[in-house]
Amino acid sequence: MPTAPRPDQPSVPAGRPPVEVAAVGETMVVLCPAPGEPLERAERVAVSVGGAESNVAGYLARLGHQAAWVSRVGDDPFGRAVVRHVAAAGVRVDQVVVDPTAPTGLYLKDPGPEGTAVHYYRAGSAASRMDLGTLADPGLTGARVLHLSGITPALSASCRALVEHAVTARPLAGSLVSFDVNHRARLWPAEQAAPVLRDLADRCDLVFVGQDEAETLWGTADPTAVRRLLPTPATVVVKDGAVGATELRRDVEPVFVPAPRVTVVEPVGAGDAFAAGYLAGLLRDLDPVRRLRLGHLMAAQALTSSGDNAPVPPWAWFEDLLDAPAEAWSPLDLTGASARV
């Protein structure tokens, strides 16, 4: 069973526990009008915060783990709002650099009859200036997991160089490198992203990828085909939406766990929640079935909540379901169930 390594005693400030997970990536301010109201007619917008990697860190922190978000923000009100929001989830923000010469990224949601469009204003953002020095902070020494995503290399040449450096030079010695493919077509088309994301993913220890995005990027029809395409990682986790998720490790039979049924309120952030749940299972040395279940249960929390950061129930709620016999898990229906005690 793959486990997140435990490096030698790290160098951290006295009295502070060491970072377990370092999550690297951009987090932006989100502006959204009322549901169903087109942006061009909106007189008011709600302000929130969104970022895949900080979402993962936030969920891990709420599950009781020491998670740090590593990034850059502008020296502006939006940057301060982002840092405050991420820190409020219990995430450590010591490694966030405030850039006085670049703005914090921004995106706007535009509801419409065909769905919600997204407009990004992130070119030249502070986070797009992340570079090879981003992971040099000694406060990250000893992190058991370094979590990255395929969003970051699309932001700029220096960000791509950072991710390539992280997966090849391994600047956080001893850390397990986790990579969520997270292809964003608005940032780069599939034909441009596909070879880059495949190369980066195949250099990591643990890869998360949706079956649909793997098919779009690489034409892979099933989890086994994805595993053949990515032979190097110790573990590849292929997520297939409401169907379930498959863990594929080298020289071990694949493990599939079906997803519980839920009524979807908002799909945004479910993949981040799944990754956080699975990583929490890894940090807790859970077996493959239980860590896949924990991923599903965290995704269910995100799917049944509005916004990017769902509440997380007490650990006792998870324990009962993680230990349920297979015949009780398979028909599990969380529709209408309140897990938020």
Image (cartoon, rainbow, N blue to C red):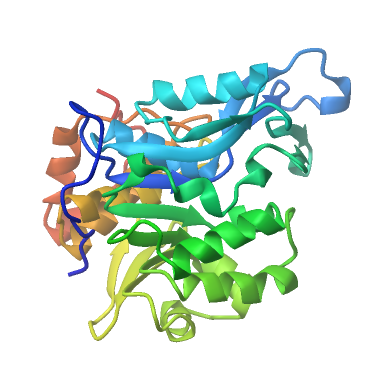
Spot occupied by residue 310 in the image (x, y as percentages of width and height): 42, 31
Residue at 53% from the left image edge and 80% from the top image edge: 221
Residue at 56% from the left image edge and 75% from the top image edge: 198
Q: Is residue 81 above or below residue 27?
A: above
- Quarter of the figure with the N terminus: bottom left
Residue at 32% from the left image edge and 53% from the top image edge: 145
Is 63 displayed left or right of 221 in the figure?
left
Q: Is residue 78 above or below residue 227?
A: above
Looking at the rendering, which quadrant does residue 239 occupy?
bottom left
Spot occupied by residue 170 in the image (x, y as percentages of width and height): 40, 64
Q: Closer to the camera, 31 or 161?
A: 161
Q: Is residue 184 visible?
A: no
Q: Closer to the camera, 317 or 7?
A: 7
Residue at 46% from the left image edge and 27% from the top image edge: 86
Q: Closer to the camera, 11 or 223?
A: 11
Is 278 displayed left or right of 77 in the figure?
left
Q: Is residue 93 above or below residue 260?
A: above
Spot occupied by residue 313 in the image (x, y as percentages of width and height): 26, 30
Q: Is residue 74 above or below residue 182?
A: above
- Quarter of the figure with the C terminus: top left
